[in-house]
Amino acid sequence: MRARGGHPLRHRRAPPPSPAGTPSVTGEDARAALSMALAAIRSIITAGPVRIDELQDR
């Protein structure tokens, strides 16, 4: 539901901050996300399933 004249997401609360020194997203998370994205792209190109561990060997 929209607030009057406002964007529907404008009043959402931000997630609580991580404890000091602990990033909420790590480089390992980013690498895993990239691997999944590359597998999805390759799957579309080849019109077949792609194993993520096949991409990590490259």
Image: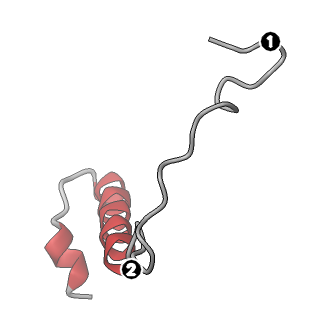
- Looking at this rendering, what residue extends furthest in the front direction? 20
Q: Write the residue at 66% across / 30% down.
A: 11
Label 1 or label 2, whichever comes before in sequence order: 1
Q: Badge 2: how crowded within 10 Å, few (<14), some, or many (20+)?
A: few
Task: Work out whether residue 31 or residue 44 is closer to the camera in this orientation and state it.
Answer: 31
Of 10 and 22, the residue lying toward us? 22
In the picture provided, is 16 more to the left or to the right than 47?
right
- Find the residue positioned furthest to the bottom: 58
List x then y, in percent, for residue 35: 31, 70
Q: Nearer the viewer, mark 1 or mark 2?
A: 1
- Residue 1 percent coordinates (x, y): 62, 11
Q: Secondary structure at mark 2?
A: helix
Position of 5 relative to 41 (above/below): above
Residue 20 against residue 43 in the figure, above or below: below
Question: Would you name the residue on which mark 1 appears?
Answer: 4
Identify the image quadrant of residue 19.
Answer: bottom left
The residue furthest right is 5
- Seen at 60% across and 33% down, the residue is 12
Q: Considering the image in quadrants, where does the C terminus appear?
A: bottom left
Q: Which residue is mark 2?
A: 27
- Where, by quadrant of the figure, is residue 54 drawn? bottom left
Answer whether labels 1 and 2 touch (C-beta < 8 Å): no
Type of amino acid under label 1:
Arg
Report how many numbered discs are placed on residues in the image: 2
Amino acid residing under circle 2? Gly
